[in-house]
């Protein structure tokens, strides 16, 4: 989903930076608040952020004969919400822009919007929708992760379509073209990512259920039900 | 007895099934097998705008890893940073759980 340096016209770089910056600042504010109120949240932040580092570094092959990155944002979205996830994504994307030439400083804003804002907001909406229903927590994690991943790439397609409308058909037609490149490749990767993060969540539930209950991520009943299932 | 490892089995099946299917059905994208979608996206932009790929110059000068070996090294470094943090925290949780 990285838009390469130089491939986005200046005005779009500025627009996406203007969208991304307030979200990063809000995320930093929320992060301070969470960590000030509960220091035990720090290790959980480490694990969820660590998985964004790991998964977004992998390039996996996919059905279209091309390869792409998972995003790994699902656990962080569920545990800390979209704004704090945005801060972690900004750090990862900055690392990739500076050292890997994946994305660039001018397109960083656009990349933060797709991976750190739109994807996580969609994922968070799914989580809020399913949290108080009887749906199994692992299915919730799977769906949040898979949809956050898919919508990251759908957003990238839209960003490129807006900047490069086709001569015939305009934005809609180039949106379809970019969806064919990004979104199609991403479907199997989103499914695998959903399974992997659901599995990781199972281990967090087994090891540290109290922090999940204290941060009110899932209700005590649901966490206990999941623990009983696993033992 | 209830089966405890449903999720583990499903995850392994998903990974193995996809990697086998994908690696055997790999088609070509501009001669390079499993080229990144980022590259394909850039080519899409070049086609749409009618500007050759090499005409896209960075707006902000950018350091590029010299060669794919260095690039894969830095990608591994990124994964390692994540892996170390995850390992430390899981270890810490297991350790503090045992103490309690």
Image (cartoon, coloured by chain):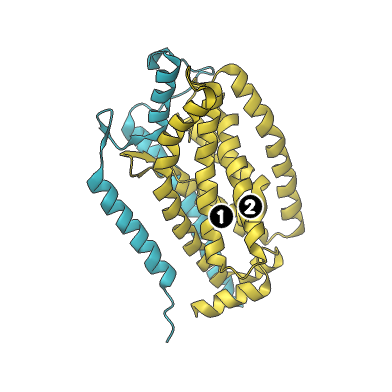
Chain colours: A yellow, B cyan
Q: Which of B46 and A16 lies nearest the eye of the viewer?
A: B46
Q: Which of A66 and B100 lies nearest the eye of the viewer?
A: A66
Q: Within the image, what quadrant is residue A128 found in?
A: bottom right
Badge 2: chain ID: A
- Could you tell me which residue is drawn at 55 percent across and 60 percent down? A141
Q: Within the image, what quadrant is residue A18 found in?
A: top right
- Could you tell me which residue is drawn at 41 percent across and 38 percent down? B74
For marks 2 and 1 on the same chain, the one whose residue lies earlier in the sequence: 2
The residue pinned by badge 1 equals: A144
Pinpoint residue A102: horizontal percent, then vertical percent.
46, 31
Q: Is residue A169 above or below residue A119?
A: above
Q: Is residue A73 above or below residue A114?
A: below
Please determine if labels 2 and 1 lie on a single subunit: yes
Q: Residue furthest left?
A: B24
* Discs 2, 1 touching: Cβ within 8 Å: yes
The residue pinned by badge 2 equals: A124
Badge 1: chain ID: A
Q: Is residue B2 above or below residue B85?
A: below
Q: Is residue A81 left or right of residue B25?
A: right
- Could you tell me which residue is drawn at 59 percent across and 53 percent down? A76
Pinpoint residue A32: horizontal percent, then vertical percent.
74, 48
Number of on-image labels: 2
Q: Secondary structure at mark 2?
A: helix
Pinpoint residue A142: horizontal percent, then vertical percent.
51, 59
């Amino acid at each position: 989903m990285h838009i390469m340096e130089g491939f986005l016209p200046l005005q779009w770089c500025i627009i996406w930076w203007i969208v991304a910056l307030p979200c990063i600042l809000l995320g930093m504010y929320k992060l301070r608040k969470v960590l000030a109120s509960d220091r035990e949240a720090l290790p959980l932040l480490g694990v969820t952020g660590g998985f964004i580092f790991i998964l977004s570094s992998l390039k996996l092959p996919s059905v279209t004969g091309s390869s792409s990155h998972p995003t790994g944002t699902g656990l962080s979205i569920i545990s800390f919400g979209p704004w704090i996830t945005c801060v972690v994504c900004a750090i990862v994307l900055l690392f990739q822009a500076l050292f890997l030439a994946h994305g660039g400083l001018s397109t960083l804003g656009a990349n933060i919007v797709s991976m750190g804002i739109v994807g996580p907001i969609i994922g968070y909406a799914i989580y809020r929708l399913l949290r108080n229903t009887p749906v199994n927590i692992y299915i919730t994690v799977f769906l949040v992760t898979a949809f956050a991943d898919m919508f990251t790439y759908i957003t990238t397609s839209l960003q490129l379509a807006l900047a490069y409308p086709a001569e015939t058909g305009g934005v809609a037609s180039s949106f379809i073209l970019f969806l064919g490149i990004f979104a199609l490749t991403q479907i199997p990767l989103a499914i695998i990512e959903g399974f992997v993060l659901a599995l990781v969540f199972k281990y967090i539930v087994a090891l540290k259920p109290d922090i999940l209950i204290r941060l009110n991520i899932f209700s005590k009943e649901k966490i206990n039900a999941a623990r009983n299932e696993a033992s | 007895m209830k089966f405890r490892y449903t999720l583990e089995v499903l995850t392994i099946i998903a990974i193995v099934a996809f990697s086998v299917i994908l690696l055997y059905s790999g088609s070509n994208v501009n001669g390079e097998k499993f080229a990144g979608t980022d590259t394909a996206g850039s080519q899409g932009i070049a086609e749409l705008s009618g500007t050759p790929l090499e005409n896209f110059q960075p707006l902000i000068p950018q350091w590029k890893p010299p060669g794919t070996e260095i690039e894969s090294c830095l990608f591994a470094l990124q994964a390692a940073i994540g892996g170390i943090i995850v390992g430390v925290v899981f270890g810490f949780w297991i350790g503090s759980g045992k103490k309690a």
